[in-house]
């Protein structure tokens, strides 16, 4: 007889693949091949299945808790909720984002994330990652194949007199971004068998990708991740104190976020330092400052934003307002409260991965978070695998989250 974990792993894998099949094509120029309303209908129905799996997970965990503690139902439920504050806060923020966001497509994004995270809890993470990696790889290859057959168009963006090609994807940065996700997912799958040949192959294809997209940040992120994974394999990080490693990773995450907020808020064209930093960051200070001046404040719980990027309808240099920095864009979309909560989740994830001796997963998660501080990758669908695998730890009890024991592997097998 199949056990609960195996059945749940198969079901969640199936629903996630169906969701990807409906949602991912519009990271590419598939609008000429598929009707958006049809594919999103498929994705939405798959999300219902994921939501059911998430509900079953919660009820199953509460049942086990009440049975183990031998409590009556009401008292056991109250104690369970009090002992799992992180997921309760997450649910609360999902509701506030839904209330404060006016656009239907984005107001449910945080709730979708929460449902997928909860559904993934207590499943076989290795199998889940392989399934999601395979789904992404098939989509990536199909998009390139359809482009070569003339079925999808190439969006060419010129920046600093350099042509950047999308080759069937919706934008050159999305092209390299999906490749970055594939590389990080591949390193996750190969984390126990990762050798120099893996790094050489990744770096070679990364160079080929860069010659087409000229996406510098994603290009550099892949290089850093490939090298750090080799260093982990050679046990370079074994002698570094856990708290020091946590301090460095958490400090860098928070410091970069704070610097981006301060520089954006104080940005003005009379400051030579800020102007130079803005050029280095490719207008990542000027554009969010412009948005801030137009709206006048950072929202507490998010609000509706009509983002206009290079590929948007009616785009012109005067109305461009797309923010290529997750920590700033997420603040406008989901609010200061959510971004602070998200930072806490990131730091707790670092702590759990470090203390449970999952250094390869920690490195990949840390690299993605560093990339997202100055890119817009955090909540994009094609980064679900790398972000979601360690994020399931939010369902652990308060004691497990803050006082995880050394060598206690946190739900990855």
Image: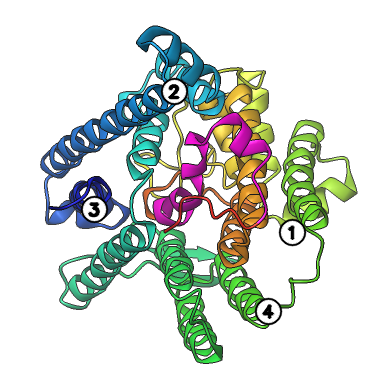
Residue designated by label 1: 280
406 lies above or below 58: below
Q: Earlier in the sequence, mark 1 or mark 3?
A: 3
Residue 94: mark in rendering: 2
Disc 2 from disc 1: Cα separation: 35 Å
Q: Main secondary structure of the magenta part?
A: helix
Disc 4 from disc 1: Cα separation: 29 Å
332 lies above or below 394: above
Disc 3 from disc 2: Cα separation: 29 Å
Is 27 left or right of 15, judged from the image as shown? right
Residue designated by label 4: 231
Q: Earlier in the sequence, mark 2 or mark 1?
A: 2
Residue 271 is situated, as x and y percent measured from the top left of the image, at 88, 43
Q: How crowded is mark 4: few (under 14 residues within 10 Å), some or many (20 or more)?
A: few
Q: Which of marks 4 and 3 is in front?
A: 3
Is 331 left or right of 24, judged from the image as shown? right
């Amino acid at each position: 007889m199949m056990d609960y974990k195996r059945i749940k792993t198969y079901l969640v894998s199936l629903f996630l693949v169906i969701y990807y099949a409906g949602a991912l094509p519009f990271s590419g120029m598939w609008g000429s091949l598929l009707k958006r309303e049809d594919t999103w209908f498929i994705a939405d129905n798959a999300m219902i299945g994921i939501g059911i799996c998430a509900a079953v997970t919660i009820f199953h965990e509460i049942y086990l808790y009440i049975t183990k503690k031998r409590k009556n139902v009401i008292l056991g439920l109250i104690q369970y909720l009090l002992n799992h504050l992180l997921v309760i806060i997450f649910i609360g923020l999902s509701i506030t984002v839904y209330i404060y966001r006016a656009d239907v497509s984005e107001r449910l994004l945080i709730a979708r994330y929460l449902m997928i995270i909860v559904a993934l809890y207590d499943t076989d993470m290795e199998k889940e990652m392989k399934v999601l990696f395979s789904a992404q790889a098939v989509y990536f290859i199909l998009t390139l194949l359809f482009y070569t057959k003339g079925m999808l168009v190439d969006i060419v963006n010129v920046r600093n007199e350099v042509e950047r090609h999308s080759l069937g994807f919706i934008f050159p940065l999305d092209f390299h971004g999906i490749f970055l996700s594939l590389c990080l997912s591949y390193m996750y799958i190969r984390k126990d068998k990762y050798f120099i040949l893996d790094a050489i192959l990744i770096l070679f294809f990364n160079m080929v990708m860069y010659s087409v997209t000229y996406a510098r940040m994603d290009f550099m992120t892949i290089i850093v991740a490939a090298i750090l994974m080799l260093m982990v394999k050679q046990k370079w990080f074994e002698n570094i104190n856990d708290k020091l490693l946590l301090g460095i990773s958490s400090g860098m995450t928070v410091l970069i976020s704070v610097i981006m907020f301060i520089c954006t808020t104080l940005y003005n064209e009379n400051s030579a330092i800020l102007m130079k930093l803005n050029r280095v960051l490719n207008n990542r200070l000027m554009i969010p400052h412009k948005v801030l001046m137009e709206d006048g404040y950072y929202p507490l719980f998010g609000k509706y934003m009509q983002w206009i990027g290079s590929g948007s309808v009616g785009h012109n240099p005067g109305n461009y307002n797309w923010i290529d920095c997750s920590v700033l864009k997420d603040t406008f979309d989901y609010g200061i409260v959510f971004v602070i909560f998200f930072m806490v989740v990131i730091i707790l994830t670092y702590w759990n991965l470090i203390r449970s001796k999952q250094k390869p997963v920690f490195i990949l998660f840390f690299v993605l978070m560093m990339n997202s501080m100055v890119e817009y990758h955090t909540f994009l669908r094609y980064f679900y695998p790398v972000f979601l695998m360690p994020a399931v730890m939010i369902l652990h009890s308060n004691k497990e989250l803050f006082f995880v024991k050394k060598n206690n592997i946190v739900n990855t097998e």
